[in-house]
Image (cartoon, grey):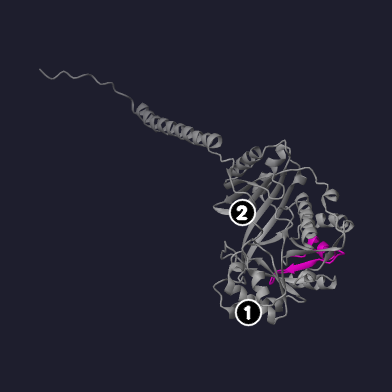
């Protein structure tokens, strides 16, 4: 007997081809569904549980030790627009969003950071604004690399500082600030019995001659203008400032703690020899006309270096220039070295716009009058922002009625 075999069903060739085509498509469909579930879970898990609203940071805000503010107009940027739109949707007014564009230049290479200072009404928690910005940033393919809550030294209110990167490159910063009611400046400025001098230095002139820069140059008061060398408008600004009877300083770039190669190549460095430092200073002084003295741009590292400061002051003494310590570091010994070497000098007491905005600058001007009332005089440093200009223009009559007198910074050196 033969072996009994089960009769097999003959399947037509056309049906077998259809089955072969259907099976791979089913497998691919299942794979896509699994991937979608995994991606959706990761996204929502990150959105709901892993978004860092902010970490607690130390009190205080670093003094300005960064690049050059080249624009205070709102730059065209899809990421910037997304941030603005997120804030506007929350109900924050466009007038409470202040934008600056800061650029560090080295030949043809530049590093640009867009900073937004946002005055947030008390009805909007900073955490909600932070979350809205984070989602808007991520939707554009960028990333919030840091969000730190700080206490503003001006009034103890809270602020969240956000750092944002695109493709791993830092491009934006957002400062969310609790908005306070406008201060009554006339009541908080202390009255003085005799004329008390205040000197205002406006830093970072040179990148361009925009409307704010021109308005500062035409202020009908003694204002000291500090100009960075080797920038497109450095010489023309010096000529206009001289014509407008302003005092002119060389804003001399010095090495900061966070020095990067993208800084201007003419920055004074701690590794330079005294001869090289002298050459750089002399060349910068030759580039900008009508210079009476010098103050440091950045310099949080170099102004703590005694040997470098002796080289700087020795050169300035030979060139018959005075030195103003911008105090970008609380540990600076620059003025001390200048005094030891017999060079006329003075120190900055206060940065007027470490946070850009009308209200903050008004408050800082009030603080400057309090210093002047206590010490007999005071020096403040600001930058050519429109809000800084507006604050100074509005505060001039208030301060003068209270007995303060605006002078050039050279009137306060010793």
Give the Cα separation between the discs numbered 1 and 2: 35 Å
Q: Is residue 290 left or right of residue 106?
A: right
Q: Which residue is mark 2?
A: 171
Q: Residues within 10 Å of mark 1 (few under 14, many from 20)?
A: some
Mark 1–mark 2 contact, CB under 8 Å? no
Name the residue at the bottom extreme: 318
Q: Secondary structure at mark 1?
A: helix
Foreground residue among 210 and 121: 121
Q: Residues within 10 Å of mark 2 (few under 14, many from 20)?
A: many
The first of marks 1 and 2 along the sequence is 2
Q: Is residue 295 left or right of residue 145?
A: right
Tell me the quarter of the image containing the N terminus: top left
Q: Which residue is mark 1?
A: 278
Q: Which mark is residue 184?
A: none
Tell me the quarter of the image containing the C terminus: bottom right
Residue 47 spot, x, y in % from top left: 55, 36
Which quadrant of the figure has residue 27?
top left
Foreground residue among 58 and 178: 58
Q: Secondary structure at mark 2?
A: strand
Residue 217 spot, x, y in % from top left: 82, 66
Residue 142 seen from this side: no
Which quadrant of the figure has residue 286?
bottom right
Residue 124 seen from this side: yes
Q: Is residue 19 left or right of residue 53?
A: left
Which residues make up the magenta segment? 208-233
Foreground residue among 104 and 61: 61
């Amino acid at each position: 007997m033969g072996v009994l075999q089960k009769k097999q069903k003959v399947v037509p060739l056309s049906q077998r081809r259809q089955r072969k085509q259907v099976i791979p498509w089913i497998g691919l469909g299942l794979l896509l569904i699994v991937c979608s579930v995994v991606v959706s879970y990761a996204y929502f898990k990150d959105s709901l549980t892993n978004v860092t609203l902010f970490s607690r940071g130390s009190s205080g805000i670093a003094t300005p030790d960064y690049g050059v503010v080249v624009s205070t107009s709102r730059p065209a940027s899809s990421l910037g627009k997304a941030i603005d739109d997120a804030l506007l949707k929350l109900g924050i007014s466009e007038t409470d969003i202040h934008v600056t564009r800061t650029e560090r230049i080295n030949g043809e290479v530049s590093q640009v950071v867009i900073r937004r200072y946002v005055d947030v009404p008390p009805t909007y928690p900073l955490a909600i604004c932070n979350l809205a910005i984070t989602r808007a940033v991520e939707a554009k393919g960028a990333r919030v690399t840091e969000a730190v809550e700080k206490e503003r030294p001006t009034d103890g209110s809270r602020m969240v500082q956000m750092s944002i990167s695109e493709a791993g490159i830092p491009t934006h910063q957002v400062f969310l600030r609790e908005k306070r009611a406008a201060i009554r400046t006339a009541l908080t400025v202390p009255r003085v019995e005799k004329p008390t001098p205040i000197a205002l230095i406006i830093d970072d002139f040179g990148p361009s001659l925009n409307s704010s820069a021109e308005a500062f140059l035409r202020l009908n008061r003694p204002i000291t203008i500090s100009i960075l060398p080797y920038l497109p408008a450095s010489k023309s600004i010096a000529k206009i400032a001289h014509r407008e009877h302003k005092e002119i300083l060389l804003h001399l770039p010095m090495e900061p703690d966070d020095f990067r190669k993208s800084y201007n190549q003419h920055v004074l460095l701690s590794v330079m020899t005294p001869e090289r430092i002298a050459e750089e200073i002399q060349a910068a002084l030759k580039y900008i006309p009508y210079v009476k003295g010098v103050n440091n741009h950045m310099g949080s590292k170099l102004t703590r270096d005694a040997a470098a400061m002796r080289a700087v002051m020795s050169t300035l003494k030979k060139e018959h220039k005075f030195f103003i310590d911008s105090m970008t570091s609380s540990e600076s010994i620059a003025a001390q070295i200048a005094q030891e070497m017999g060079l006329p000098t003075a120190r900055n007491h206060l940065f007027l716009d470490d946070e850009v905005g009308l209200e903050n600058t008004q408050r800082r001007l009030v603080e400057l009058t309090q210093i002047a009332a206590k010490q007999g005089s005071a020096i403040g440093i600001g930058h050519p922002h429109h809000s800084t200009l507006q604050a100074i223009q509005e505060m001039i009559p208030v301060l003068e009625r209270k007995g303060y007198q605006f002078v050039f910074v050279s009137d306060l050196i010793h």
